[in-house]
Image (cartoon, grey):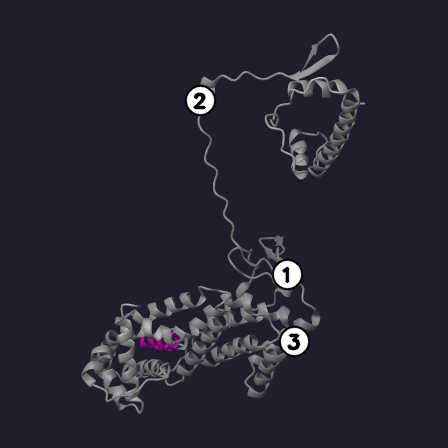
Amino acid sequence: MIYSKNTIKNIAESIGLPKLKDGITTAMAQDVEYRLHEVIGEAAKFMQHSKRTKLTVADVNSALRVRNIEPIYGFETGRPVKFHKAATALEDVFYVDDEQIDLDTLLEEPLPSVPLEVVYTAHWLAIEGVQPQIQQNPAPGDEDSGEPAAKRAARVQRSDGVETIPLVKHVLSKELQLYYECVTESLASADPVVKSTALESLSVDAGIHQLVTYFVQYIAVTVKNNLHSLEVLRTAMAVARAIRRNPNLFIEPYMHQLVPSLLTCLVSKRLCESYAEDHWSLRDGAAEQIAEICQSFGQSYHTLKTRIARTLLRAFLDPTKPLTTHYGAIVGLTKLGVGMVKVLVLPNVKAYAALLDVELEKDNPQLASDARRCQAALLGALRALADSYDDLEPAAPQRTRLAETVGSSLADAVLADADGARIAAAVAAAGREARSPGL
Protein backbone atom coordinates (compact mmCIF):
# COMPACT_ATOMS: atom_id res chain seq x y z
CA MET A 1 0.00 0.00 0.00
CA ILE A 2 1.43 3.40 -1.05
CA TYR A 3 -0.73 5.52 1.22
CA SER A 4 -0.35 4.20 4.79
CA LYS A 5 -3.08 4.04 7.41
CA ASN A 6 -0.84 5.96 9.85
CA THR A 7 -1.14 9.01 7.60
CA ILE A 8 -4.93 8.73 7.83
CA LYS A 9 -4.69 8.61 11.65
CA ASN A 10 -2.41 11.67 11.74
CA ILE A 11 -4.76 13.70 9.53
CA ALA A 12 -7.78 12.57 11.60
CA GLU A 13 -6.11 13.63 14.86
CA SER A 14 -5.24 17.04 13.34
CA ILE A 15 -8.93 17.74 12.68
CA GLY A 16 -10.13 16.42 16.05
CA LEU A 17 -10.94 12.75 15.32
CA PRO A 18 -8.67 10.66 17.56
CA LYS A 19 -8.50 6.89 17.86
CA LEU A 20 -9.94 5.76 14.52
CA LYS A 21 -10.32 2.01 14.19
CA ASP A 22 -7.82 0.15 12.03
CA GLY A 23 -10.54 -1.09 9.67
CA ILE A 24 -11.68 2.47 8.93
CA THR A 25 -8.17 3.80 8.37
CA THR A 26 -7.29 0.87 6.10
CA ALA A 27 -10.44 1.38 3.97
CA MET A 28 -9.87 5.13 3.73
CA ALA A 29 -6.20 4.65 2.80
CA GLN A 30 -7.21 2.32 -0.04
CA ASP A 31 -9.84 4.81 -1.29
CA VAL A 32 -7.37 7.70 -1.14
CA GLU A 33 -4.81 5.63 -3.07
CA TYR A 34 -7.45 4.86 -5.73
CA ARG A 35 -8.34 8.56 -6.04
CA LEU A 36 -4.68 9.49 -6.32
CA HIS A 37 -4.25 7.02 -9.18
CA GLU A 38 -7.23 8.64 -10.96
CA VAL A 39 -5.91 12.20 -10.54
CA ILE A 40 -2.37 11.26 -11.59
CA GLY A 41 -3.68 9.40 -14.64
CA GLU A 42 -5.76 12.45 -15.64
CA ALA A 43 -2.78 14.76 -15.03
CA ALA A 44 -0.61 12.52 -17.23
CA LYS A 45 -3.08 13.09 -20.09
CA PHE A 46 -2.65 16.86 -19.76
CA MET A 47 1.13 16.37 -19.73
CA GLN A 48 1.03 14.27 -22.91
CA HIS A 49 -1.25 16.71 -24.77
CA SER A 50 1.13 19.52 -23.79
CA LYS A 51 4.01 17.61 -25.46
CA ARG A 52 5.95 17.38 -22.19
CA THR A 53 7.64 14.50 -20.38
CA LYS A 54 7.65 16.10 -16.92
CA LEU A 55 4.51 16.22 -14.80
CA THR A 56 3.89 19.67 -13.29
CA VAL A 57 1.65 21.10 -10.61
CA ALA A 58 -0.40 22.77 -13.36
CA ASP A 59 -1.22 19.35 -14.81
CA VAL A 60 -2.41 18.12 -11.41
CA ASN A 61 -4.52 21.24 -10.90
CA SER A 62 -6.07 20.81 -14.35
CA ALA A 63 -6.93 17.22 -13.50
CA LEU A 64 -8.52 18.33 -10.23
CA ARG A 65 -10.60 20.96 -12.05
CA VAL A 66 -11.85 18.35 -14.52
CA ARG A 67 -13.15 16.32 -11.56
CA ASN A 68 -14.72 19.41 -9.91
CA ILE A 69 -12.15 19.38 -7.08
CA GLU A 70 -10.61 22.58 -5.78
CA PRO A 71 -7.01 22.86 -7.05
CA ILE A 72 -3.96 22.94 -4.80
CA TYR A 73 -2.89 26.50 -4.04
CA GLY A 74 0.64 27.71 -3.34
CA PHE A 75 2.62 25.08 -5.26
CA GLU A 76 2.30 26.29 -8.86
CA THR A 77 5.63 28.00 -9.46
CA GLY A 78 8.36 28.01 -12.04
CA ARG A 79 10.87 26.63 -9.56
CA PRO A 80 10.88 22.95 -8.57
CA VAL A 81 9.34 22.02 -5.23
CA LYS A 82 11.93 20.80 -2.70
CA PHE A 83 10.98 18.32 -0.01
CA HIS A 84 12.94 17.90 3.23
CA LYS A 85 13.05 14.80 5.41
CA ALA A 86 12.45 14.85 9.12
CA ALA A 87 13.29 11.66 11.02
CA THR A 88 10.88 10.57 13.76
CA ALA A 89 10.73 7.56 16.06
CA LEU A 90 8.16 5.78 13.90
CA GLU A 91 8.90 6.81 10.31
CA ASP A 92 10.38 9.54 8.15
CA VAL A 93 8.20 12.57 7.41
CA PHE A 94 8.72 14.71 4.31
CA TYR A 95 7.74 18.38 4.23
CA VAL A 96 8.09 21.37 1.91
CA ASP A 97 10.49 24.04 3.05
CA ASP A 98 8.62 27.36 2.97
CA GLU A 99 10.66 30.19 1.53
CA GLN A 100 11.02 33.30 3.66
CA ILE A 101 9.86 36.41 1.78
CA ASP A 102 11.15 39.87 2.64
CA LEU A 103 8.03 42.07 2.61
CA ASP A 104 10.03 45.29 2.32
CA THR A 105 11.70 44.07 -0.87
CA LEU A 106 8.38 42.84 -2.20
CA LEU A 107 6.67 46.21 -1.58
CA GLU A 108 9.46 48.14 -3.28
CA GLU A 109 9.20 46.16 -6.51
CA PRO A 110 7.37 47.95 -9.36
CA LEU A 111 3.81 46.90 -10.05
CA PRO A 112 3.23 44.73 -13.10
CA SER A 113 1.56 46.30 -16.12
CA VAL A 114 -2.21 46.15 -16.31
CA PRO A 115 -3.28 43.40 -18.73
CA LEU A 116 -5.26 44.48 -21.78
CA GLU A 117 -8.94 43.63 -21.92
CA VAL A 118 -9.89 40.77 -24.19
CA VAL A 119 -11.93 41.97 -27.16
CA TYR A 120 -13.70 39.63 -29.56
CA THR A 121 -14.82 40.50 -33.08
CA ALA A 122 -16.64 38.28 -35.56
CA HIS A 123 -16.17 38.10 -39.30
CA TRP A 124 -16.61 35.60 -42.13
CA LEU A 125 -13.45 33.54 -42.52
CA ALA A 126 -14.86 31.41 -45.32
CA ILE A 127 -18.31 30.90 -46.80
CA GLU A 128 -18.99 27.73 -48.75
CA GLY A 129 -15.25 27.32 -49.19
CA VAL A 130 -14.79 30.90 -50.46
CA GLN A 131 -12.88 33.52 -48.45
CA PRO A 132 -14.58 36.95 -48.44
CA GLN A 133 -12.30 39.82 -49.40
CA ILE A 134 -12.61 41.92 -46.24
CA GLN A 135 -10.06 43.73 -44.12
CA GLN A 136 -9.72 40.94 -41.56
CA ASN A 137 -8.82 38.33 -44.18
CA PRO A 138 -5.63 38.27 -46.27
CA ALA A 139 -6.46 39.59 -49.72
CA PRO A 140 -5.53 37.46 -52.75
CA GLY A 141 -3.52 39.05 -55.53
CA ASP A 142 -4.92 40.71 -58.65
CA GLU A 143 -8.21 41.71 -57.03
CA ASP A 144 -9.14 44.13 -59.76
CA SER A 145 -8.45 41.81 -62.67
CA GLY A 146 -11.89 40.19 -62.59
CA GLU A 147 -10.21 36.80 -63.10
CA PRO A 148 -11.50 33.82 -61.09
CA ALA A 149 -9.52 33.07 -57.96
CA ALA A 150 -9.02 29.51 -59.15
CA LYS A 151 -6.78 30.73 -61.94
CA ARG A 152 -4.98 33.23 -59.69
CA ALA A 153 -4.30 30.49 -57.13
CA ALA A 154 -2.95 28.12 -59.74
CA ARG A 155 -0.65 30.74 -61.28
CA VAL A 156 2.87 31.28 -59.97
CA GLN A 157 3.80 34.97 -59.95
CA ARG A 158 7.37 36.06 -60.71
CA SER A 159 8.78 39.27 -59.27
CA ASP A 160 12.50 40.08 -59.53
CA GLY A 161 13.29 36.45 -60.12
CA VAL A 162 11.48 35.33 -56.96
CA GLU A 163 8.58 32.92 -57.33
CA THR A 164 5.59 33.55 -55.07
CA ILE A 165 2.42 31.52 -54.73
CA PRO A 166 -0.82 33.07 -53.38
CA LEU A 167 -1.64 31.95 -49.86
CA VAL A 168 -5.38 31.55 -50.49
CA LYS A 169 -6.42 28.87 -52.92
CA HIS A 170 -9.93 28.01 -54.01
CA VAL A 171 -10.07 25.45 -56.78
CA LEU A 172 -13.16 25.53 -58.98
CA SER A 173 -14.22 22.68 -61.14
CA LYS A 174 -13.50 22.89 -64.85
CA GLU A 175 -17.23 23.21 -65.55
CA LEU A 176 -17.63 26.22 -63.24
CA GLN A 177 -14.61 27.95 -64.74
CA LEU A 178 -16.03 27.48 -68.24
CA TYR A 179 -19.44 28.71 -67.02
CA TYR A 180 -17.91 31.88 -65.53
CA GLU A 181 -15.95 32.64 -68.69
CA CYS A 182 -18.97 31.99 -70.90
CA VAL A 183 -21.30 34.20 -68.83
CA THR A 184 -18.85 37.12 -68.58
CA GLU A 185 -18.23 36.97 -72.32
CA SER A 186 -21.99 36.90 -72.96
CA LEU A 187 -22.52 39.91 -70.69
CA ALA A 188 -20.01 41.85 -72.78
CA SER A 189 -21.76 40.87 -76.01
CA ALA A 190 -23.56 43.48 -78.11
CA ASP A 191 -26.34 40.99 -78.87
CA PRO A 192 -29.23 41.66 -76.43
CA VAL A 193 -30.49 38.08 -76.79
CA VAL A 194 -27.14 36.61 -75.67
CA LYS A 195 -26.95 39.05 -72.78
CA SER A 196 -30.50 38.37 -71.59
CA THR A 197 -29.86 34.61 -71.77
CA ALA A 198 -26.83 34.97 -69.50
CA LEU A 199 -28.80 37.09 -67.02
CA GLU A 200 -31.64 34.59 -67.00
CA SER A 201 -29.19 31.80 -66.24
CA LEU A 202 -27.78 33.81 -63.30
CA SER A 203 -31.27 34.36 -61.91
CA VAL A 204 -32.39 30.71 -61.91
CA ASP A 205 -29.34 28.41 -61.97
CA ALA A 206 -28.95 26.40 -58.75
CA GLY A 207 -25.40 25.14 -59.25
CA ILE A 208 -23.41 28.38 -59.25
CA HIS A 209 -23.19 29.13 -55.55
CA GLN A 210 -19.39 28.85 -55.58
CA LEU A 211 -19.29 31.59 -58.22
CA VAL A 212 -21.29 34.16 -56.21
CA THR A 213 -18.20 35.83 -54.76
CA TYR A 214 -16.66 36.03 -58.25
CA PHE A 215 -19.74 37.68 -59.73
CA VAL A 216 -19.86 40.15 -56.83
CA GLN A 217 -16.22 40.96 -57.55
CA TYR A 218 -17.07 41.22 -61.25
CA ILE A 219 -19.73 43.83 -60.43
CA ALA A 220 -17.32 45.86 -58.26
CA VAL A 221 -14.53 45.82 -60.85
CA THR A 222 -16.93 46.62 -63.71
CA VAL A 223 -18.41 49.63 -61.90
CA LYS A 224 -14.98 50.89 -60.89
CA ASN A 225 -13.40 50.63 -64.34
CA ASN A 226 -16.40 51.76 -66.45
CA LEU A 227 -17.83 54.63 -64.45
CA HIS A 228 -18.72 56.66 -67.57
CA SER A 229 -20.01 53.79 -69.69
CA LEU A 230 -23.76 53.74 -69.12
CA GLU A 231 -24.47 50.48 -70.94
CA VAL A 232 -21.77 48.58 -69.04
CA LEU A 233 -23.09 49.95 -65.74
CA ARG A 234 -26.61 48.84 -66.65
CA THR A 235 -25.24 45.33 -67.26
CA ALA A 236 -23.49 45.33 -63.88
CA MET A 237 -26.71 46.39 -62.13
CA ALA A 238 -28.62 43.69 -64.03
CA VAL A 239 -26.11 41.07 -62.80
CA ALA A 240 -26.57 42.31 -59.24
CA ARG A 241 -30.34 42.04 -59.58
CA ALA A 242 -30.10 38.55 -61.10
CA ILE A 243 -27.91 36.99 -58.39
CA ARG A 244 -29.97 38.68 -55.64
CA ARG A 245 -33.23 37.30 -56.94
CA ASN A 246 -31.91 33.79 -57.54
CA PRO A 247 -33.71 31.75 -54.84
CA ASN A 248 -30.99 29.09 -54.89
CA LEU A 249 -28.13 31.42 -53.87
CA PHE A 250 -27.14 32.54 -50.37
CA ILE A 251 -26.25 36.16 -51.05
CA GLU A 252 -26.44 37.63 -47.53
CA PRO A 253 -22.70 37.41 -46.63
CA TYR A 254 -21.78 39.43 -49.72
CA MET A 255 -23.94 42.49 -49.03
CA HIS A 256 -20.98 44.49 -47.70
CA GLN A 257 -19.31 44.11 -51.12
CA LEU A 258 -22.43 44.68 -53.24
CA VAL A 259 -23.85 47.81 -51.58
CA PRO A 260 -20.89 50.14 -52.45
CA SER A 261 -21.29 49.36 -56.14
CA LEU A 262 -25.00 50.15 -55.97
CA LEU A 263 -24.36 53.40 -54.09
CA THR A 264 -21.82 54.40 -56.73
CA CYS A 265 -24.42 53.99 -59.47
CA LEU A 266 -26.89 55.97 -57.35
CA VAL A 267 -24.98 59.09 -56.29
CA SER A 268 -21.97 59.22 -58.62
CA LYS A 269 -21.37 62.62 -60.23
CA ARG A 270 -21.44 61.31 -63.79
CA LEU A 271 -22.42 57.92 -65.18
CA CYS A 272 -22.21 58.54 -68.94
CA GLU A 273 -20.18 60.39 -71.54
CA SER A 274 -23.07 62.44 -72.91
CA TYR A 275 -25.64 64.33 -70.85
CA ALA A 276 -28.27 63.27 -73.37
CA GLU A 277 -28.08 59.65 -72.19
CA ASP A 278 -30.69 58.45 -69.70
CA HIS A 279 -28.60 57.91 -66.57
CA TRP A 280 -31.60 58.82 -64.39
CA SER A 281 -33.23 55.42 -64.89
CA LEU A 282 -29.98 53.73 -63.81
CA ARG A 283 -30.05 55.74 -60.57
CA ASP A 284 -33.71 54.81 -60.05
CA GLY A 285 -32.90 51.12 -60.51
CA ALA A 286 -29.96 51.30 -58.09
CA ALA A 287 -32.22 52.98 -55.50
CA GLU A 288 -34.78 50.19 -55.86
CA GLN A 289 -32.12 47.52 -55.37
CA ILE A 290 -30.75 49.24 -52.25
CA ALA A 291 -34.26 49.46 -50.81
CA GLU A 292 -34.84 45.75 -51.53
CA ILE A 293 -31.56 44.86 -49.80
CA CYS A 294 -32.51 46.88 -46.71
CA GLN A 295 -35.91 45.22 -46.61
CA SER A 296 -34.51 41.70 -47.07
CA PHE A 297 -31.45 41.89 -44.81
CA GLY A 298 -32.35 44.67 -42.38
CA GLN A 299 -33.05 42.12 -39.64
CA SER A 300 -29.62 40.50 -40.00
CA TYR A 301 -27.69 43.77 -40.38
CA HIS A 302 -29.36 46.16 -37.97
CA THR A 303 -27.24 49.19 -38.92
CA LEU A 304 -27.38 48.67 -42.69
CA LYS A 305 -30.35 50.96 -43.39
CA THR A 306 -29.09 53.61 -40.96
CA ARG A 307 -25.63 53.76 -42.53
CA ILE A 308 -27.02 53.97 -46.06
CA ALA A 309 -29.45 56.71 -45.02
CA ARG A 310 -26.61 58.65 -43.38
CA THR A 311 -24.54 58.42 -46.56
CA LEU A 312 -27.44 59.60 -48.73
CA LEU A 313 -28.30 62.44 -46.33
CA ARG A 314 -24.75 63.77 -46.47
CA ALA A 315 -24.91 63.74 -50.27
CA PHE A 316 -28.32 65.47 -50.22
CA LEU A 317 -27.29 68.27 -47.85
CA ASP A 318 -23.89 69.01 -49.41
CA PRO A 319 -24.32 72.09 -51.66
CA THR A 320 -20.95 71.43 -53.31
CA LYS A 321 -22.21 68.15 -54.79
CA PRO A 322 -23.68 68.21 -58.33
CA LEU A 323 -27.42 68.00 -58.90
CA THR A 324 -27.06 64.48 -60.27
CA THR A 325 -25.78 63.35 -56.88
CA HIS A 326 -28.62 65.23 -55.14
CA TYR A 327 -31.14 63.45 -57.36
CA GLY A 328 -29.74 60.03 -56.47
CA ALA A 329 -29.77 60.87 -52.77
CA ILE A 330 -33.40 62.07 -52.86
CA VAL A 331 -34.58 59.02 -54.79
CA GLY A 332 -32.60 56.71 -52.52
CA LEU A 333 -34.05 58.21 -49.33
CA THR A 334 -37.54 58.02 -50.81
CA LYS A 335 -37.15 54.35 -51.69
CA LEU A 336 -35.95 53.57 -48.14
CA GLY A 337 -39.40 54.36 -46.82
CA VAL A 338 -41.77 57.11 -45.82
CA GLY A 339 -40.08 57.35 -42.43
CA MET A 340 -36.92 58.64 -44.12
CA VAL A 341 -39.00 61.19 -46.03
CA LYS A 342 -40.59 62.49 -42.82
CA VAL A 343 -37.41 62.63 -40.75
CA LEU A 344 -34.66 63.43 -43.28
CA VAL A 345 -36.15 64.90 -46.46
CA LEU A 346 -39.14 67.02 -45.38
CA PRO A 347 -37.27 69.16 -42.79
CA ASN A 348 -34.67 70.10 -45.44
CA VAL A 349 -36.97 70.56 -48.44
CA LYS A 350 -37.39 74.33 -48.09
CA ALA A 351 -33.65 75.06 -47.93
CA TYR A 352 -32.94 72.72 -50.80
CA ALA A 353 -35.75 74.20 -52.91
CA ALA A 354 -34.05 77.60 -52.52
CA LEU A 355 -30.86 76.05 -53.92
CA LEU A 356 -32.80 74.73 -56.91
CA ASP A 357 -34.27 78.20 -57.51
CA VAL A 358 -30.75 79.59 -57.81
CA GLU A 359 -29.81 76.90 -60.35
CA LEU A 360 -32.99 77.50 -62.37
CA GLU A 361 -32.21 81.21 -62.64
CA LYS A 362 -28.81 80.55 -64.21
CA ASP A 363 -28.46 80.74 -67.98
CA ASN A 364 -27.48 77.09 -68.29
CA PRO A 365 -29.94 74.68 -69.93
CA GLN A 366 -28.20 71.60 -68.53
CA LEU A 367 -28.30 72.85 -64.94
CA ALA A 368 -31.94 73.88 -65.37
CA SER A 369 -32.81 70.41 -66.66
CA ASP A 370 -31.02 68.73 -63.74
CA ALA A 371 -32.76 71.08 -61.28
CA ARG A 372 -36.16 70.16 -62.70
CA ARG A 373 -35.25 66.48 -62.29
CA CYS A 374 -34.39 67.08 -58.63
CA GLN A 375 -37.64 69.01 -58.19
CA ALA A 376 -39.55 66.07 -59.67
CA ALA A 377 -37.71 63.73 -57.27
CA LEU A 378 -38.79 65.92 -54.33
CA LEU A 379 -42.34 65.88 -55.62
CA GLY A 380 -42.14 62.09 -55.80
CA ALA A 381 -40.98 61.99 -52.17
CA LEU A 382 -43.95 64.14 -51.12
CA ARG A 383 -46.29 61.93 -53.16
CA ALA A 384 -44.93 58.85 -51.32
CA LEU A 385 -45.59 60.71 -48.07
CA ALA A 386 -49.19 61.32 -49.12
CA ASP A 387 -49.65 57.66 -50.07
CA SER A 388 -48.70 56.62 -46.53
CA TYR A 389 -51.84 58.29 -45.08
CA ASP A 390 -54.84 56.03 -45.67
CA ASP A 391 -57.49 58.15 -43.98
CA LEU A 392 -56.24 61.53 -45.17
CA GLU A 393 -59.01 63.91 -46.24
CA PRO A 394 -57.79 66.37 -48.88
CA ALA A 395 -58.74 69.97 -48.17
CA ALA A 396 -58.35 73.14 -50.14
CA PRO A 397 -54.57 73.74 -50.04
CA GLN A 398 -53.26 77.05 -48.76
CA ARG A 399 -50.27 78.09 -50.84
CA THR A 400 -48.80 80.38 -48.20
CA ARG A 401 -48.72 77.70 -45.53
CA LEU A 402 -47.41 75.10 -47.99
CA ALA A 403 -44.65 77.46 -49.18
CA GLU A 404 -43.51 77.93 -45.57
CA THR A 405 -42.75 74.20 -45.42
CA VAL A 406 -41.49 73.28 -48.90
CA GLY A 407 -40.55 76.57 -50.51
CA SER A 408 -42.26 78.73 -53.08
CA SER A 409 -41.26 76.98 -56.31
CA LEU A 410 -41.96 73.48 -54.99
CA ALA A 411 -45.30 74.67 -53.60
CA ASP A 412 -46.28 75.80 -57.11
CA ALA A 413 -45.23 72.37 -58.47
CA VAL A 414 -47.33 70.62 -55.81
CA LEU A 415 -50.42 72.71 -56.53
CA ALA A 416 -50.01 72.08 -60.27
CA ASP A 417 -49.99 68.32 -59.69
CA ALA A 418 -53.19 66.30 -60.02
CA ASP A 419 -52.80 65.08 -56.41
CA GLY A 420 -51.74 68.48 -55.14
CA ALA A 421 -54.50 68.77 -52.53
CA ARG A 422 -53.70 65.36 -51.04
CA ILE A 423 -49.94 66.09 -51.03
CA ALA A 424 -50.49 69.44 -49.32
CA ALA A 425 -52.68 67.78 -46.69
CA ALA A 426 -49.98 65.11 -46.08
CA VAL A 427 -47.29 67.77 -45.67
CA ALA A 428 -49.46 69.58 -43.15
CA ALA A 429 -50.16 66.34 -41.26
CA ALA A 430 -46.45 65.47 -41.14
CA GLY A 431 -45.69 68.94 -39.83
CA ARG A 432 -48.23 68.51 -37.03
CA GLU A 433 -46.70 65.14 -36.13
CA ALA A 434 -43.23 66.69 -35.99
CA ARG A 435 -44.46 69.43 -33.63
CA SER A 436 -46.30 66.95 -31.41
CA PRO A 437 -44.66 66.67 -27.94
CA GLY A 438 -45.16 62.91 -27.99
CA LEU A 439 -42.59 62.47 -30.77
How far apart marks 2 and 1 lie (CA) works out to 59 Å
Point out the stretch of residues depicted in magenta: 322-334
Secondary structure of the magenta portion, mostly?
A: helix
Q: Nearer the viewer, residue 274 or 48?
A: 48
Crowd class of label 1 (few under 14; some 14 to 19; many from 20; radius 10 Å): some
The crowding category of the residue bearing disc 3, from other C-alpha atoms within 10 Å (few below 14, some 14 to 19, many at least 20), is few
| Horizontal and vertical percent position of residue 396 | 23, 89
Residue 161, horizontal then vertical, whole percent = 61, 53
Q: Quadrant of residue 81?
A: top right
x and y percentages locating residue 177 in the rendered image: 66, 71
State which quarter of the image contains the C terminus: bottom left
What residue does disc 1 label? Answer: 153
| Pointers 3 and 2 in contact (C-beta within 8 Å) | no
Q: Foreground residue, 45 or 250?
A: 45
Callout 1 secondary element: helix
Amino acid of disc 1: Ala
Mark 3, residue position:
206
Q: Which residue is mark 2?
A: 107
Q: CA distance from mark 1 to mark 3?
A: 25 Å
Please state which of the two labelled residues, at mark 1 or mark 3, is closer to the viewer.
Answer: 3
